[in-house]
Amino acid sequence: MPRPPRADEAGAIYHALNRGNARRPIFSKDADYEAFEQLIAEGLEKFPVDLIAYQWMKNHWHMVLSPQVDGGMSAFVGWVTLTHTQRYHAHHRTVGHGHVYQGRYKSFPVQDDEHFHLACRYVERNALTAKIVKRSENYRWGSLYNWLGGESEIELARWPIRRLPSWVEHVNAALSAQEQKALRHCVARGAPFGTLDWTEETVRRLGLESTVRPRGRPRKPA
């Protein structure tokens, strides 16, 4: 089956993520997270891409990105994934022992309105959702901690739209079941996340019809 097309336009916003192979851990100790953070900082110097929000979890990571040139996100995330895999195997002495990641990263376009705020909340509260921390801003390996002045190797990009007032409280507030379902659908399918009109226009313009088409074989006419 051919891979679905991947949107990667300059100036657009994307939610990107990847998971450990078979959901196995890719970070086991603080030093692993620190090394990955340094790797991200290196990548941001090499590639023209803005990192808006992020969170590293034990067996996966999330990033909200905006490439400055067409193809910039794929170049950045591809380098990060390959370099992290190489360094992981070298450090753990597991060269030839299988894949670190489940495959190529997933991503989907995000509209620059309240959908953007929701995507960032989803990312920045990941550890809270998993009940690892009691407050999202206390999670060391996330952009909310970084934004509030926590120690980090990473320089965050300026947001394309302003944060909502009392942003920290917004992040700590639980997403509704409908909001979570919509975002998880986009994660699974790579479908654009936005209003109906914006989504339809984005799908047509970027050739992303396969991300919104129902799965399975079409029904035969009666």
Image: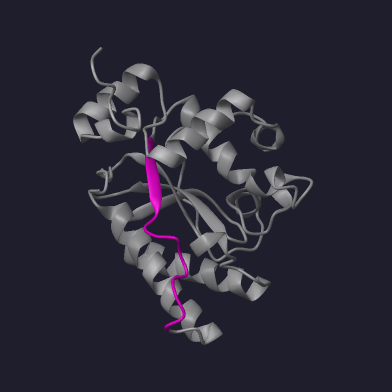
Answer above or below: position of 53 versus 90: above
Instruction: Say which quarter of the image contains residue 29.
Output: bottom right
Q: Position of residue 16 (x, y in %)?
A: 43, 49
Q: As drawn, which residue projects farthest toward the front?
A: 222
Q: As rendered, which of 18 and 83 lies closer to the eye?
A: 18
- In the image, taking residue 64 as reference, residue 126 lies left or right, namely right
Percent x, y for residue 58? 62, 61
Magenta region includes residue 11: no
Magenta stretch: helix, strand or loop mostly:
loop
Q: Is residue 154 above or below residue 67?
A: below
Report the side of 73 relative to 187 (left or right): left
Residue interval drawn in magenta? 96-109
Is residue 149 visible to the viewer in this orientation of the structure?
A: yes
The extreme right residue here reads 134
Q: Quadrant of residue 205?
A: top left
Say which residue appears at 37% left-offset and 18% top-offset: 196
Q: Nearer the viewer, residue 185 or 221?
A: 221
- Number of marks in the image? 0
Name the residue: 39% across, 38% down. Answer: 189
- Residue 162 position (above or below residue 74): above
Query: Which one is in front, 132 or 24?
Result: 24
Q: Quadrant of the C terminus?
A: top left
Q: Position of residue 9 (x, y in %)?
A: 26, 43
Q: Is residue 108 magenta?
A: yes
Q: Residue furthest top?
A: 222
Image quarter for residue 44?
bottom left
Residue 162 appears in the picture as rendered: no
Residue 125 lies, with reference to residue 101, above or below; the image says above
147 left or right of 86 in image: right
Q: Residue at x 56, y 44 (%)?
A: 123
